[in-house]
Image: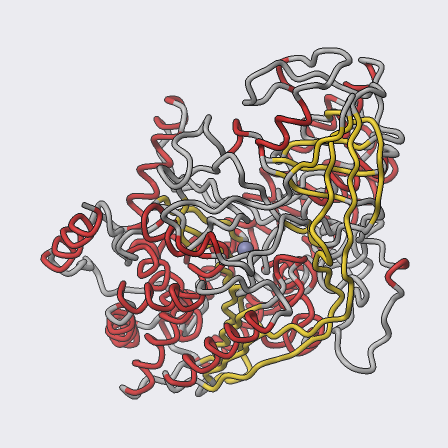
Amino acid sequence: MRTFLSLLLQLVILAAPAFSQTTNAIDGFTAQRAVDQRRWEEQFRAVPAPKSAREHLRRLTLEPHIAGTKEDYATAVYVRDQLRSYGIAAELKEYSVWLNYPNTPTVLELITNKRQKLSTVEAVVAGDPTSSNPKITPLFNGYSASGDVTAPVVYANYGLPNDYEDLKKAGVDGKGKIVIVRYGNSFRGVKAKVAQDHGAVGCIIYSDPADDGYMQGDVYPKGPWRPVASGQRGSVQYLFDYPGDPLTPGRPAIDGVERLKPEEATDLTRIPVQPIAYDVARTIIAPLKGPVRPRGFQGGLPFAYHAGGTDDVKVRLKTDMDYKLRPIWDVVARIDGSTEPNRWVVLGNHRDAWVFGAVDPNSGTSAMLEVGRGLGDLLKRGWKPRRTIVLCSWDAEEYGLIGSTEWAEELAGELKEKAVAYLNLDAAVSGVHFGASSVPSLWKLMRAVTRDVKDPKTGKSVYQAWQDRTQELRSEEERATGGEARIAPLGSGSDYTPFLQHLGIASTDMSFGGDYGVYHSAYDSFYWMDHFGDPGFFYHVAAAQIWGTMALRLADADGLSFDYTDYANEIREFFRETVRIAGRRNLASAFDEKEMNEAVDDFAKEAERMEKARLDAVKSGDREKLARINDALMNAERQFIDQRGLRGRAWYKHQIYAPGIYTGYAAQPLTDFRQALDERNGANAKEGLGRIVEAVKRATATLKQGRD
Ligand SMILES: [Zn+2]
């Protein structure tokens, strides 16, 4: 049935008329060059194909390939050799970083009036051939501490600060306890830190069926959702403090570099943390006593959740971690630019996976290889990019964005001077719904490119399908105003972080999403992708087409398609929203609203003048002028970097975008200003906003210089 259906889809796609353009004009290209560019882009988009995308994914997901293992190394060699076979120079780049694997599987016991051993492995699933692979790592958390603790259990909901406050009101606390918390609402590293801060001696994190299990739909292998004996692995590094190798913050993890002692690293938890499946969570939570919890604490297990904390329900948690400096391998491939080799367009995707990683991340790796194949085809036909294109396959992203961070730290000087943009792709395909996050300066480009790529399912453009869905999800009121498909702010949780938030390089991220319940489990496998995520592999092709077209536009444009008017408007919107929050907290008089409004107004005016100057320069083809304008457009983003860094976490330097301390992956725009308001600290709010104003003024001045 499935095979027939995908065959049918393929026929439909072959029979459909070529996706046609109404106009040849491309923003940032002279009329003459736009004609050539269209031709190259169409040529490029004709190359990625379902068959090869599927084969890449099959090869990449044959074995579990967690960072630092020989199976991981084999995937690096595969990616490097594929890219070389397309005629692109590619090299491995090795770093030596602090990683843990479980030495022995975690011991988990429930102690009531008897002792009961609980499972910390995932079950074999009939039908999925790789789910019985003996090399599947047991459930564990990257950067958990080793420990052997026995203590009463407290159920702490999502494990965020307000959950502990609620518990306290009910007379229960985490001190000396093992807390059990559910995934969701924030990054798991936040849960580990908040547990430790509240005196917990251990932390168990489980996947509630309400979140990604049976309450969402049929579970695997009948449907795409998490089955009962599945858990979510993942890192509990304090990513919001700094990502990358824990022992070399701000420095590359190479020979001769000074390393912290592990106990000096401030981004590591000191308590054992362990993920479990929901059948195991059921066994632990069901007997809990103490006060029954309110609605916001209840999940999808078939009983009322209680707070626990009593001595008659205890758990023993013993984690035994093997920590070592281990090698990891990025693959870096490069196509040198012809006229502007010192301007780089960088594409990146991570390759390491907790287990097989069919969605996360290797759907993106497959797309990257198809981008490489497409660019290789253009090279053979005589195309040369104006600027250099760099393709990066990162390692150890799962532990904490390590491969990308170490590379960005090692090449910091060069990247600051040369990088035009960084385009990220992580879990590229788990369904058919396009979504994107980006700095506002690249919104226009992202929308333009998605207008030129066909959505496989609907036959419309990806943009149209995306906008239609945005409209569906909007309220009636919002719908009436129409408007463009929304692009989210960049927080953290993938490899754009070192580029945007440490170095100030304009960045984007995107994916085709869907019903994806097997995140970080052994069932994120080729079989899952082939049956649920992307049967037919058409969306892998679409992802490659979008990604590659964006790279071609940025690499070849006469005048870079960067729009700072969108940036100014977005900052204004962030500020309005944050001022409202300040008002609610009686902090509106703590800072000077006027100064910021003026700075943003000036930025908006300058952005408009710059846009006009750019269009004029493109029209006249004045190379010297274009070079100055392009550099200003590239460097304006750098101005949002403040070398002093954010308060208490100096690695993060971007004044507009960073993850919040408690928001996990989600962005907390105008970060330090907002953080100070959350902490009700007027002096810090004033100082935080002052730095943002300075950054906005610097960006304005940079645009102005490029125009003069
Ligand atoms: Zn990933």
Residue 523 image offset from top left, x and y in percent: 47, 48
Residue depicted at 39% across the width and 45% down the height: 126
Number of numbered discs on residues:
0
> Where is residue 92, by image quadrant?
bottom right
Q: Ligand 1 falls in which quarter?
A: bottom right
Residue depicted at 32% across the width and 55% down the height: 539
Residue 191 image offset from top left, x and y in percent: 73, 38
Q: Nearer the viewer, residue 507 or 366?
A: 366
Residue 324 image offset from top left, x and y in percent: 78, 67
Q: Height in image: 433 above or below 258?
A: above
Residue depicted at 66% across the width and 42% down the height: 275
Q: Nearer the viewer, residue 568 or 673?
A: 673
Placement of the N terminus among the 4 image quadrants: top left
| Horizontal side, residue 368 vs residue 536: left or right | right
Q: Nearer the viewer, residue 676 or 433?
A: 433
The answer, for residue 529, to whether it is visible in the render is yes
Placement of the C terminus among the 4 image quadrants: bottom right
Q: Height in image: 624 above or below 598?
A: below
> Where is residue 635, by image quadrant?
bottom right
| Horizontal side, residue 473 vs residue 153: left or right | left
Q: Height in image: 21 above or below 403?
A: above
| Horizontal side, residue 360 vs residue 195: left or right | left
> Where is residue 261, by image quadrant?
bottom right
Residue depicted at 32% across the width and 58% down the height: 542
